[in-house]
Image: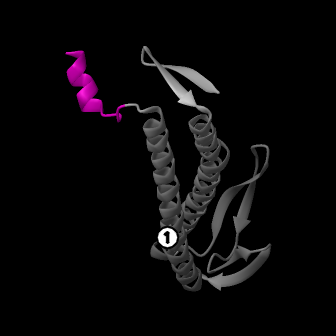
Amino acid sequence: MFLSLMCFGHVTVMDEGRQKDLQLLEEIIDKGLKQKLVHATASRDKIFEEQKVLSDLRKNLETLENNDVNSLKTMVNLGSEVYMQAEVPDTRHIFMDIGLGFYVEFTRQEALDHISQREERIKKQLEEFTGVITQIKGRIKLAHYQIQQILNLPEENNTSSRQRAF
């Protein structure tokens, strides 16, 4: 069986084997690689959020330390943007979430040390996810290149297409 495709104004006749190869590559891109890319990007974004929270906490602790603040009045978000005034009588010790719903009491300096350690771990995780995302994008480009080869299309080259337009 032969299938004909319209490609850039030219009719191309394609055999069934090549058509199956195209379908397989398109499935790999759409159902595999793009989903992995979305998942990896979402995971990296969550890590970026955690990095931002830690950075803000570190800045706040450094401000308390540098200004020698031992008590504090603040507004606490109770949810749904409802706030309540709160007083913290002793800011020399804080409770930090260390994961899985567990909190540990730290002095300011201990908290800063713990934050630095977590920031290093987060930096490594971000590097790993960025590498995974780069690999997935490379595989997608490779699959697109293979599709171009199957269809006998010229390689996409922005400069050559611009030159043809003028």
Q: Is residue 11 magenta?
A: no
Residue 115 position in % (x across, y down): 56, 76
Left or right side of 145 for 81: right
At a point 62% along the width and 47% down the height, the residue shown is: 28
Q: Quadrant of residue 3?
A: top right
The residue segment tinted magenta is: 154-166
Residue 68 position in % (x across, y down): 50, 76
- In this rendering, the answer to whether 97 lies above or below 136 is below
Nearest the camera: 156 or 22? 22
Left or right side of 56 for 1: right
The amino acid marked with disc number 1 is Lys
Nearest the camera: 11 or 24? 11
Residue 50 position in % (x across, y down): 60, 63
What secondary structure do most residues of the magenta stretch adopt?
Answer: helix
Nearest the camera: 48 or 156? 156
Quadrant into which the N terminus falls: top right
Nearest the camera: 1 or 102? 1
Display colour scheme:
one colour
Q: Quadrant of residue 117?
A: bottom right
State the residue position of label 1: 123
- In this rendering, the answer to whether 100 lies above or below 56 is below
- In this rendering, the answer to whether 116 lies above or below 49 is below
At a point 71% along the width and 65% down the height, the residue shown is: 87
